[in-house]
């Protein structure tokens, strides 16, 4: 097995017609804008999609994409453990957009859901602030909420994982509809 590579946005754009692009962000993030032709298979649904991704990889290169590159690197590792070589997009959709490339939106996408990193920052900040306020106004034990979030952020940085993102991804606005996921898997099967 060869070491998977990261493509620059320019290289990916030049090869887009020959790549199978899998966007591993949440459906809400995907609806906010994705690479042309990308299929949305959220990171937590990757195991279910393995046989179809393997078929796509047998036909040609698979590019795994997320907002910044962190989740696509996690997806690349999961796929590599299953014997599937993939490519990742350096800097993710953020870099794609910053380089002036167009992001597509699904038909009927009416509202933009915050990206997962923004959702995590908002939730962590809210819980820390709530812990501090309740700690001063109600009981000092509420400050443990703030300490717990701080410990979680340190752990997240050290392990390059994010438990809060995993939990937030399970909220209804971040979940794929069964029909959307089935459509993405069918598209992988049919090439």
Image (cartoon, grey):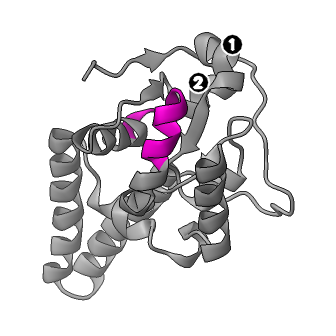
In what quadrant of the picture does the N terminus appear? top left
- Picture residue at 49% right of the left edge, 75% below the top: 171
Residue 16, image x and y in percent? 68, 23
Return the disc, 2 or 1, that comes first in the chain's sequence. 1
The residue tagged 2 is: 95
On the image, which quarter does residue 149 sit in?
A: bottom left
Residue 103, image x and y in percent? 75, 36
Q: Which mark is residue 152?
A: none
Nearest the viewer among 88 and 179 is: 179
On the image, which quarter does residue 97 sit in?
A: top right
In the rendered image, the vertical position of residue 32 relative to residue 66, given as above or below: below
Residue 121, image x and y in percent? 43, 53
In the rendered image, the vertical position of residue 110 relative to residue 34, given as above or below: below
> Are the residues flagged by discs 2 and 1 in contact, CB closer than 8 Å?
no
> Which residue is outermost to the bottom?
138
In the rendered image, the vertical position of residue 184 relative to residue 182, given as above or below: above
Task: Evaluate whether residue 53 shows in this view.
Answer: yes
Nearest the viewer among 89 and 158 is: 89
- Picture residue at 50% right of the left edge, 25% below the top: 91
């Amino acid at each position: 097995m060869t070491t998977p590579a990261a493509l620059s946005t320019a290289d990916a754009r030049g090869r887009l017609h020959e790549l199978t692009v899998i966007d591993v962000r949440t459906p809400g993030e995907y609806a906010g804008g994705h690479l042309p032709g990308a299929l949305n298979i959220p990171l937590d649904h990757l195991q279910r999609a393995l046989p179809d991704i393997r078929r796509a990889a047998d036909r040609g290169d698979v590019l795994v994409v997320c907002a910044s590159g962190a989740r696509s690197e996690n997806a690349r590792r999961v796929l590599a453990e299953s014997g599937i070589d993939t490519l990742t997009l350096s800097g993710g959709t953020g870099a794609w957009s910053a380089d002036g490339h167009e992001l597509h939106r699904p038909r009927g996408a009416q509202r933009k859901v915050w990206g997962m990193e923004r959702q995590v920052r908002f939730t962590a900040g809210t819980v820390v602030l709530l812990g501090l306020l309740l700690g001063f106004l109600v009981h000092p034990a509420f400050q443990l909420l703030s300490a717990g979030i701080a410990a979680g952020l340190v752990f997240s940085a050290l392990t390059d994982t994010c438990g809060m993102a995993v939990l937030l991804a399970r909220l209804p606005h971040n979940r794929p509809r069964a029909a959307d996921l089935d459509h993405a898997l069918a598209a992988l099967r049919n090439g």
